[in-house]
């Protein structure tokens, strides 16, 4: 599929991209090449190919879920201007 210069100008306008006249021919060519590649990829036989989220079947190595810092809740609560039963109180924002 080949794009015309006017098509690229419309696309650039809709995408709010500033494409100068000097760049317009190169952008038109590049976009046409991308669309041609997509057309070629659409002709590939994908019958029986399962979709996958990642090309490698690997599992993520996870670390143990354990606390790495001391509990400083009481310290932080004592520094807060207002607290009530362990909750931070803030001024009302919406009337």
Image (tube, helix red, strand yellow):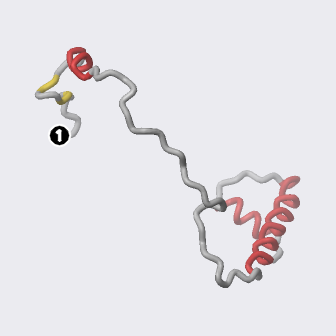
Examine the image and state in which quarter residue 58 appears.
bottom right
How many callouts does the rendering have? Answer: 1
Establish if 47 lies above or below 65: below
Observer-nearest residue: 40 or 17?
A: 40
Residue 5 in view in this figure = no
Q: Quadrant of the C terminus?
A: top left
Q: Position of residue 89 (x, y in %)?
A: 18, 28
- Circle 1 packing at 10 Å, graded few (<14), some (14-19), many (20+), is few
Answer with left or right where residue 75 lies relative to residue 65. Answer: left
Q: Position of residue 74 (x, y in %)?
A: 21, 19
Q: Looking at the image, which residue is at 37% across and 23% down?
A: 69
Establish if 28 lies above or below 84: below
Examine the image and state in which quarter residue 8 appears.
bottom right
Answer with left or right where residue 46 lies relative to residue 62. Answer: right
Pointer 1 residue: 95
Residue 79 in view in this figure = yes
Examine the image and state in which quarter residue 79 appears.
top left
Answer with left or right where residue 12 lies relative to residue 90. Answer: right
Q: Looking at the image, which residue is at 79% across and 67% down?
A: 34
Q: Secondary structure at mark 1?
A: loop
Q: Residue furthest left?
A: 85
Q: Quadrant of the N terminus?
A: bottom right
Establish if 12 lies above or below 81: below
Observer-nearest residue: 4 or 2?
A: 2
Observer-nearest residue: 24 or 84?
A: 84
């Amino acid at each position: 599929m080949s794009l015309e210069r006017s098509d690229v100008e419309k696309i650039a306008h809709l995408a709010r991209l500033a494409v100068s006249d000097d760049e317009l021919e190169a952008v038109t060519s590049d976009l046409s090449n991308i669309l041609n590649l997509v057309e070629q990829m659409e002709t590939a036989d994908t019958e029986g190919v399962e979709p996958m989220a990642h090309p490698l079947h690997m599992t993520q190595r996870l670390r143990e879920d354990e606390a790495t810092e001391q509990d400083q809740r009481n310290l932080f609560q004592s520094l807060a201007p207002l607290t009530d039963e362990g909750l931070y109180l803030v001024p009302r924002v919406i009337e």
